[in-house]
């Protein structure tokens, strides 16, 4: 690490020692080169995908993002319905997942004894390890029928006056995708929240308790209120994951390019249309349009993840008193 | 006791109970998913699943031997390609990682790691598939791109856990820096690094999206690495979406294999790390 002084300036008297330093320099160059390879990889991803997406972007221009028209036979493409599907399913996922993630992070970090927080933390982390395809299978054959027969009739009865819960219960659709996504992003948000809470000094908590606050008041005043920006970063990271999630969503969202307010309706997301159509695109323009969607997904993920990481690291620095 | 105090105690109780409830809610999905996968998968899995090729639609029996072999080949290739590269990059970021360049590269690696896997599939499609067609090589390349940043970041984290006095001791004995890293720091971090590699393998073995249009799929064993190749996740996907009961059964069996693989790796690496954790705790 950096604290270790560099050996490269040491006495270059004997030839044997000079050789050793040559080896050091070579080693340094090699590992540095491999690290730069990451940058090369990222840049070449941008270039390759951009090149393939260019024909469609040139053909349709901005219209591509604001029209809802996905006609593979007529070679006319507009991605609005897909953008809507991605954004809406992610919002549903966040609405369900954010309270749960923040709650479980608070519980594990602040309330639970160690013997309980370890195994529960493991269970939540394992949610992130299960392959997306397994969630899709489970969502399609277990969750969707359950939503159709139990949850959706109840929602219709209680909130049927809202346009969100309109129409016949289908099971498969936006709601199902939202629930599956919520399960999948919970470990991401929860683990970043735990990091953020852990960065707050114990003294802040002790101060609140010392002034006579109850346990909850302490959590509210010294943990939640101080960590708002960090939690926002965690939520954005979860959002980034939800945007790019492909297989599980493809299997449970119904795959129809339409913009319907009702959460019962099938939809299509930017990622799911890629999984459905990319391997058998009808024409060059179709392939290019699909790639253009992939390019948007890429750019959005770069921006979202970049900004979230920035926010979280800034929060942690502030708490450590470095800024 | 006055009213305000009792109210505060009440709010405290309700809120803490609420937090407990949310925590339970977060832990439940893992149980629900694994119970169903176990239940349906155990009913469908048999020895044939590992040894037989798929039968035609609607026929009883058959297995996913081709997909298991295909997955093993592609994941193996990805490991061979990404582990040396990722480990070296991890060494740079941990051992020479204080410069502006290193911070920038670390950020790049984070961005690569959070790229949606389907986008990686498109990249490899444009880079390889367009010229040579669907192949195991293309699938392996996509998995490599996904695995690389994970390997780099986890090995960096693990190398950083080795305390500086180990490095200082080596340098004080007159060892050159590369020897300190290769002979002292790496062995000290060995179990942690291996853990990271295993977790990266587990992650990549379940990836479906990037294989859909790079390796495509195959109903038989592939004869060479230049042919479309079956993989377990893609086969599970195709079978899950099929209208035939028998195929859906096979999909559950495949899901069971994937989940067991992931859970076993996660559990065993955790135990390994706990028993060998010298420095970090």
Image (cartoon, coloured by chain):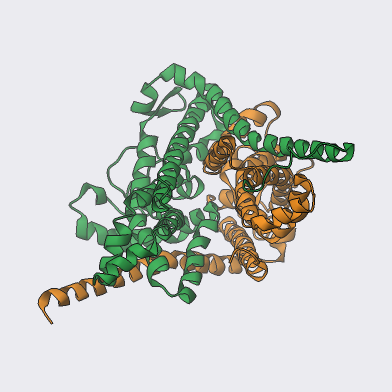
Chain colours: A green, B orange
Q: Position of residue B218 (x, y in %)?
A: 68, 44
Q: Is residue A296 above or below residue A57?
A: below
Q: Position of residue A77 (x, y in %)?
A: 42, 25
Q: Furthest-top residue in view? A: A59
**Quadrant in the rendering for residue A148:** bottom left
Q: Quadrant of the C terminus of chain B?
A: bottom right
Q: Is residue B55 left or right of residue B209?
A: right
**Quadrant in the rendering for residue A223:** bottom left
Q: Position of residue B50 (x, y in %)?
A: 71, 60
Q: How many marks do you count on the picture? A: 0
**Residue A172 seen anywhere in this rendered image of the structure:** no
- In the image, B190 versus A52, the foreground residue is B190
Q: Furthest-left residue in view? A: B3
Q: Is residue A316 left or right of residue A3?
A: left
Q: Quadrant of the N terminus of chain B?
A: bottom left
Q: Position of residue A304 (x, y in %)?
A: 42, 39
Q: Is residue A148 above or below residue A281?
A: below
**Residue B247 seen anywhere in this rendered image of the structure:** yes
Q: Furthest-bottom residue in view? A: B1
Q: Is residue B216 above or below residue B195?
A: above
């Amino acid at each position: 690490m950096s604290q270790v002084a560099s050996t490269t300036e040491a006495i270059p008297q004997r030839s044997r020692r000079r050789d050793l330093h040559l080896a050091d320099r070579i080693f340094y160059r090699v590992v540095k080169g491999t690290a730069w390879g990451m940058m090369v990889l990222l840049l070449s991803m941008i270039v390759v995908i951009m090149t393939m997406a260019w024909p469609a972007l040139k053909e349709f221009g901005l219209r591509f993002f604001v029209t809802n028209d996905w006609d593979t036979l007529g070679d006319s493409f507009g991605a609005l319905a897909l953008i809507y599907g991605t954004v809406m399913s992610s919002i549903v996922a966040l609405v369900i997942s954010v309270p749960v993630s923040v709650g479980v992070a608070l519980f594990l970090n602040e309330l639970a004894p160690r013997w309980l927080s370890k195994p529960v933390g493991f269970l939540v982390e394992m949610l992130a390890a299960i392959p997306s395809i397994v969630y899709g299978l489970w969502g399609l054959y277990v969750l969707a029928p359950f939503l159709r027969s139990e949850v959706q009739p109840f929602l219709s009865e209680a909130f049927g006056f809202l346009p969100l819960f309109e129409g016949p219960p289908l099971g498969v659709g936006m709601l199902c995708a939202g629930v599956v996504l919520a399960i999948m992003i919970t470990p991401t948000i929860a683990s970043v929240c735990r990091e953020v809470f852990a960065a707050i000094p114990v003294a802040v908590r002790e101060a609140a308790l010392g002034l006579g606050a109850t346990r909850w008041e302490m959590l509210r005043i010294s943990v939640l209120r101080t960590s708002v920006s960090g939690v926002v970063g965690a939520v954005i990271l979860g959002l980034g994951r939800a945007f790019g999630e492909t297989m599980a969503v493809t299997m449970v969202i119904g795959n129809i390019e339409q913009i319907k307010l009702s959460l019962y309706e099938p939809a299509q997301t930017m990622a799911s249309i890629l999984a459905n159509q990319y391997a058998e695109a009808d024409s060059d323009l179709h392939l290019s349009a699909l790639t253009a969607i992939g390019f948007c997904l890429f750019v959005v993920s770069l921006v979202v993840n970049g900004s979230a990481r920035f926010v979280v690291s800034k929060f942690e620095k502030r708490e450590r008193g470095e800024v | 006791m006055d009213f305000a105090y009792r109210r505060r105690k009440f709010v405290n109780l309700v809120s803490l109970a609420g937090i407990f409830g949310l925590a339970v809610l977060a832990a439940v999905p893992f149980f629900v998913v694994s119970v169903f996968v176990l239940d349906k998968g155990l009913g469908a899995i048999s020895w044939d699943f590992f040894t037989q090729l798929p039968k035609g639609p609607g026929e009883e029996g058959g297995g996913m031997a081709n997909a298991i072999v295909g997955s093993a080949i592609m994941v193996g290739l990805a490991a061979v390609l990404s582990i040396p590269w990722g480990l070296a990059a991890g060494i740079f970021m941990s051992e020479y990682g204080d410069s502006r360049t290193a911070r920038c590269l670390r950020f790049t690696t984070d961005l690569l790691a959070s790229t949606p896997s389907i986008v990686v599939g498109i990249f490899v499609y444009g880079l390889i598939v367009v010229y040579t067609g669907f192949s195991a090589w293309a699938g392996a390349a996509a998995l490599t791109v996904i695995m690389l940043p994970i390997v780099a970041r986890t090995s960096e984290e693990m190398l950083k856990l080795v305390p500086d006095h180990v490095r200082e001791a080596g340098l004080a004995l007159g060892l050159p820096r590369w020897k300190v890293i290769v002979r002292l720091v790496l062995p000290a971090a060995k179990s942690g690094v291996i853990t990271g590699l295993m977790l990266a393998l587990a992650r990549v073995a379940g990836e479906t999206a990037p294989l859909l249009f790079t390796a495509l799929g195959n109903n038989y064993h592939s004869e060479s690495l230049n042919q479309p190749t079956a993989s377990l996740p893609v086969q599970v996907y195709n079978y899950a979406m099929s209208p035939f009961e028998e195929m859906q059964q096979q999909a559950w069996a495949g899901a069971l294999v994937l989940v067991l693989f992931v859970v076993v790796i996660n559990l065993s690496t955790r135990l390994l790390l706990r028993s060998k954790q010298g420095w970090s705790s």
